[in-house]
Amino acid sequence: IGLFHELLDIPENYKIIFLGGGASTQFFEVPANFLNTKAGYVNTGVWSKKAIKEAKRYGEVELLASSEDRNFTYIPKGFAIPSDLDYVHITSNNTIYGTEYWKFPKVNVPLICDMSSDILSRDIDFGQFDMIWAGIQKNLGAAGVALAILKRSLLATARTDIPEFLQYQTFVKKDSTFNTPPVFCIYSLNRMLHWIKNMGGLPAIEERNKVKARLIYDVIDTSDGFYKGHAEKEARSRMNVTFNLANAEMEADFVAKAKANDFIGVKGHRLVGGLRVSLYNAVTPEAAEALADFMKEYMRVNG
């Protein structure tokens, strides 16, 4: 907990808890605790849709904005935010479509953010959020636990007419040990936090992630259309680079050739196809550089 406060510069008026069940559990646990009448959601892809679906079980959901009209290639901006919302919920990074928030909305109601796939990848003002939640398996450790960082003033509004296990206050009061916690997952998280600190903290991690993303995006941008990026440039994710080749057959060949060269996991998500390169914290700049070299060679042979 102390490392989280130190690395993220989280003010003392926040509580940090660990929760079993992973990120998907939070899609319904957030509205179960905080949706009394109406909440606002921004739809930027698959994970936002899942959060919206679960929230509708607990109250009214107002869709504040969506990027679905252009196949989730951008992050919506400039939308109105009603003052009568219980909270606004956004997803900071969209793993499937490769978009990421670089400027968060200014709100006069509580702001809740799913940071499952980019938490601790960059240095931001975490104090602008009333709640951050995340599954840890992308950047912070082994799958099986979620963390929640909650402002005390938001916690004070949480519902108490839901099962005790679903109440965030339960885990605050019991120091995350209301039931037996996922110990190994929390241990791996602890080691990752120490690694981030030893690397130089979030400023150093952010610079490292910028280098990795730049290596891959530069190949796409200088390919004269051979590689076609999915996300609009101003919304590009550093964690997930999504792109296409001329056709599905060439994309399948790219995946096969990449695997033969020990680059695995570059096939796009089954919902959208194409190709995807994930550059989470544990990926080294050397690995990103090697993949960029492979992409250049593949283009030379097949272009």
Image (cartoon, rainbow, N blue to C red):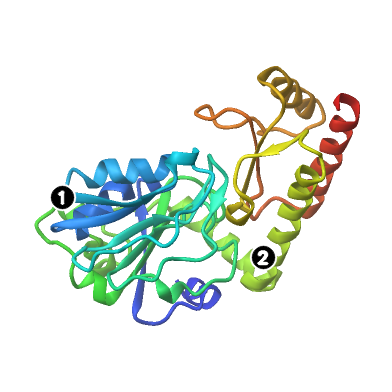
In the image, 207: left or right of 28? Answer: right
Within-10-Å neighbours for mark 2: few <14, some 14–19, many 20+? many
Compare residues 3 and 158 and report the one nearer the observer: 158
Residue at figure coordinates x 14%, y 51% from the top left: 163
Residue at figure coordinates x 58%, y 71% from the top left: 123
Quarter placement of the N terminus: bottom left
In the image, 159: left or right of 228? Answer: left
Residue 205, label in figure: 2
Which residue is denoted by mark 1 in the rendering? 59
Mark closer to the observer (2, 1):
1
Can the viewer see residue 59 in this picture? yes
Query: Mark 2 belongs to which amino acid?
Result: Ile
Earlier-in-chain disc, 2 versus 1? 1
Compare residues 283 and 94 and report the one nearer the observer: 94
Residue 124's spot in the image, x, y percent? 54, 71
Compare residues 141 and 248 and report the one nearer the observer: 248
Residue at figure coordinates x 24%, y 47% from the top left: 55
